[in-house]
């Protein structure tokens, strides 16, 4: 089960990179401009916030199923 969770996490990270890259980088450059850097930062922060909420929700569901 732990290996499956690691694989799912890696999959989510790769998906995040793809999504944020597509949204924030219009063309590759030697250096990130401030707009792209801000966009990437915001994109990652939203992903982390969402992941924390989802993890918390799954923990609640698991606790309820164990208590029943």
Image (spheres, helix red, strand yellow):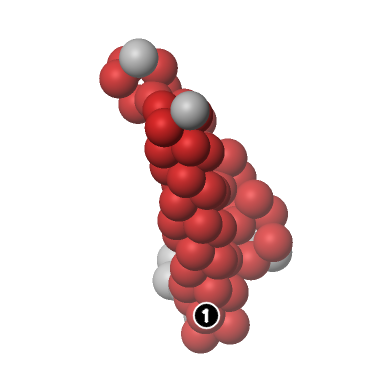
Q: In x, y percent, where is residue 11?
A: 50, 30
Q: Which residue is located at x 52 percent, y 48 percent?
A: 57
As drawn, 36 above or below 52:
below
**Vertical comparison of 54 with 11: above or below:** below
Residue 4: where, in percent of width, then height? 40, 17
**Foreground residue among 20 and 30:** 20
Tell me, yes or no, if residue 32 can be seen here: yes
Task: Answer above or below: position of 37 versus 28.
Answer: below
Number of residues whose C-alpha sits closer than 10 Å to that of mark 1, classed few (under 14), some (14–19) or many (20 or more): few
Identified at 35% across, 14% down, the residue is 1
Residue at 30% from the left image edge and 20% from the top image edge? 2
Q: Is residue 13 left or right of residue 2?
A: right
Q: Residue furthest front?
A: 68
The image quadrant of residue 28 is bottom right
Front-lying residue, 27 or 41: 41
**Element under label 1?**
helix
Provide the residue designation for mark 1. Answer: 38
Tell me where residue 46 appears, x and y as whole percent.
55, 66
Q: From this viewpoint, which residue is outermost toward the left?
A: 2
Decide: is 43 above or below 15: below
């Amino acid at each position: 089960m732990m290996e499956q969770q690691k694989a799912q996490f890696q999959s989510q990270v790769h998906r995040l990179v793809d999504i944020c890259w597509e949204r924030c980088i219009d063309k590759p450059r030697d250096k990130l401009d401030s707009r792209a850097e801000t966009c990437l930062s915001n994109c990652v922060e939203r992903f982390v916030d969402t992941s924390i909420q989802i993890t918390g929700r799954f923990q609640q569901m698991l606790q309820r199923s164990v208590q029943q």
